[in-house]
Image (cartoon, rainbow, N blue to C red):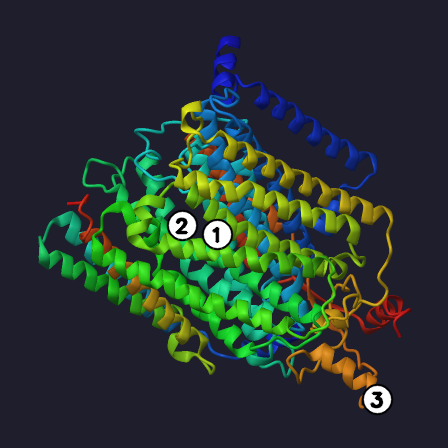
Amino acid sequence: MAQHETAHEESHGSLKTYSIGFLCSIVLTIIPIAIVLGGWFDGMVSKVVLMGAAALQFIVQLIFFMHLREEQKPRYNLMALILGIVILLIIVVGSMWIMLYNMVAV
Amino acid sequence: MWEKVKSFASEFFVTGDPMIYGADVSIVLVTLAIIVGLSYFKKWGWLWREWLTTVDHKKIGIMYIIASFIMLFRGGVDALLMRAQLAMPNMEFLAADHYNQVFTTHGVIMILFMAMPFMFGLFNVIVPLQIGARDVAYPFLNALSFWLFFSGAMLFNLSFVIGGSPDAGWLAYPPYSGLMHNPGVGQDFYIWGIQISGIGSLMTGINFIVTILKMRAPGMKLMKMPMFPWSVLSSCIAIIFSFPILTATLALLFLDRYAGAHFFTLDGGGNPMMYINLIWMWGHPEVYIIVLPAFGIFSEIVSTFAKKKLFGYKSMVFAMIIISVLSFLVWAHHFFTMGSGADVNAFFALTTMLIAIPTGVKVFNWLFTMFRGKITFETPMLWTIGFIPCFVTGGMTGVLLSVAPADFQFHNSYFLVAHFHHVIIGGVVFGYFAGLYYWWPKLFGFKLNERIGKWAFWLWNIGFYLCFMPQYVLGLMGMTRRVYTYGWDKGWWEMNLVSTIGAGFMGIAFLFQIWQIIYSVKHLKKDETGDPWNGRTLEWSIPSPAPLYNFATLPQVSDQDEWWEEKQRRANGQQVPAKPVLEPIHMPKNSGIPIVMSMCWFLAGFGFVFHWQWLTIPGLIGVVACMLVHSFNYNNDYYIPVDEITRTESELRKVTS
């Protein structure tokens, strides 16, 4: 137990950064809901906007709440993130590939 | 009024089968016996203080292992019921729908509620001791993981006496697991049992990654870490990336059933194939999650009992990490026959065959470790030696299955059933047994009886080959999995009868193991050394069972097999054991929140199963309340004073020093 007392000195953000992060994530949540419920765009445009909002939301979470920029070495969080993204891509691209070629699905 | 109660009860409880009534009676009797026993001996306070609220990783580990043995019993009974039904043609022992329930619960229990907790139990009791830590990184979270697993397992197991068991197979493929074809509550028990215990599994994965990365003893570089923590690390990496997929997939299935969504339905734009695709993205890594720690255990045992350093340490580490990442690239080999086309099948066939390479590397490493070693054949080593040929042949039938065109013949036949039992029993079960026998003295301070252990080993092995080798042949003869009966004209009965006899052998072997434990407790021969196998790693440097704080002073590590090297140094007189300078030890306090919070989850899950909002909502409120209480509780640690450590140490080391 003695080991992890010493590791508590890194900063974990301030009220200001948390507020900015919270606002950003709320806005990025409201936009997609409004688009879907209001039917502002359709087809390709709405897909691109929705996915864009999701990607921005992901970045906001990582920077303001996961404190990715403030990490000290060794950068386990960054390594885990990269591996996570690789696996995420495998899952998404792999599923699309498998399901698109799936004769039953067509 | 009475009529209403009667009609509710006949829906709520499972009725009609004499075996179920027998189970009802025995559940009530066992529960009564436990309650009466605890009250008579006035042990409720002891149970609450020492076990139910503990955050000590060793006790949590022991509870995991006990729970997994109970689940092994239930899953084993399911297996024997199935084998009894298949022993002869046209048997009328189990009806078709009952058979479906039995194979479903057998699969779910054996993987999720037997193998997983057995594995977590071994993680818990050994990893902190091997890396020279005093506990895991998050002791509270660890207790919460255990109780979540336990609640999930209880919720799932309740289904066979209340409401009805799930019957859609261990992975619950839609459309059969959808509401349209499966309107009963069994499938909801499945979803919530797995969801609740899945949260626990994910948290354990995080907990052990942090423990291994952050809490190693001073001087223990990653590449000087024993092999078991390496296997735990690679297994946990796969856990944290694959369990969220399971949770999401089952959540979507739940929405289909509960809220009328159409993710996996046949109409409304849904696609059941997507479920199969998603569930195997978890399902395949899952089998590597459970087998990697077994590889770690074998590595420790081989080097201890051959009295040699592990051959090819670095290649072993790389092989484990590669297996854990590659396991995410092979999932489609479970549904080659789905019709995704030659490109997809070729890709996944190749990645599957690639996994055989790192696995082969490990087998050679174990063989070379044994080469010219002074091997002794105690039970842990016997299980290891039993494992190697079993896993190699089982792995090879896996390579046969990975050939996509041939798979169209093998798919969902008994060939497949034989293959996965071959690798999971031969790899996982043998591995965890080996680990349990090996570390038992560390857990409880005495060895298990060797003679009965050898009987159990041979019965398990003979039973295993008798049971599963005929199933390969049956598969090639056209017997498909999950058939509940067959006719005389098929020509399958001889093989099936042999297989059932083999299953009976394994059942007897399990009884031998229980007898072995009871016998060894009765004829207790206490191990005073703390190092009964002449071990190589740090867990053997402390007394058994380990004191609450594990290490009075944290060890300073300079070598890969630190304790072995230390013993050599002491024997050569190069180093006298240093007089320890004791300091107060910082420890976490016990907490009742994990068990209370898990009970709230249990109630919420039960409410979800029966669509009882009056139970779900209070349950979920209870969960949130527990979180709040825990976040505002600052009184959660204490220090063990130096004189108490001195007293404990002198008592424990009376004989050794």
Counting residues from the start of the chain, the first of labels 2 and 3 encountered is 2
In x, y percent, where is residue B609? 44, 33
**Viewer-proximal residue, B609 or B80?**
B80
Is residue A10 at least partly visible in the picture? yes
Question: For residue B369, what is the image quadrant?
Answer: bottom right
Question: Which quarter of the figure is the N terminus of chain A placed in?
Answer: bottom right
Q: How far from the left and from the top, in percent, is residue B112? A: 51, 47
Circle 3 SS class: loop
- Amino acid carrying label 2: it is Thr
Chain of residue at mark 2: B
Marks 3, 1 in one chain: yes
Q: Do the residues under discs 2 and 1 have CB atoms within 8 angstroms?
A: yes
Crowding at label 1, few (<14), some or many (≥20) Cα neighbours within 10 Å? Answer: some
What is the CA distance from the residue labelled 2 to the residue labelled 3?
56 Å
Circle 3 residue: B573
Residue at the disc numbered 2:
B247
| Residue at point 58%, 64% (across, down) | B138
Judge if badges 2 and 1 mark residues of a common chain. yes
Tell me the distance, in whole angstroms, between the alpha carbons under discs 3 and 1: 51 Å
Q: Quadrant of the C terminus of chain A?
A: top left
Task: Tell me the kind of residue under disc 1.
Answer: Ile
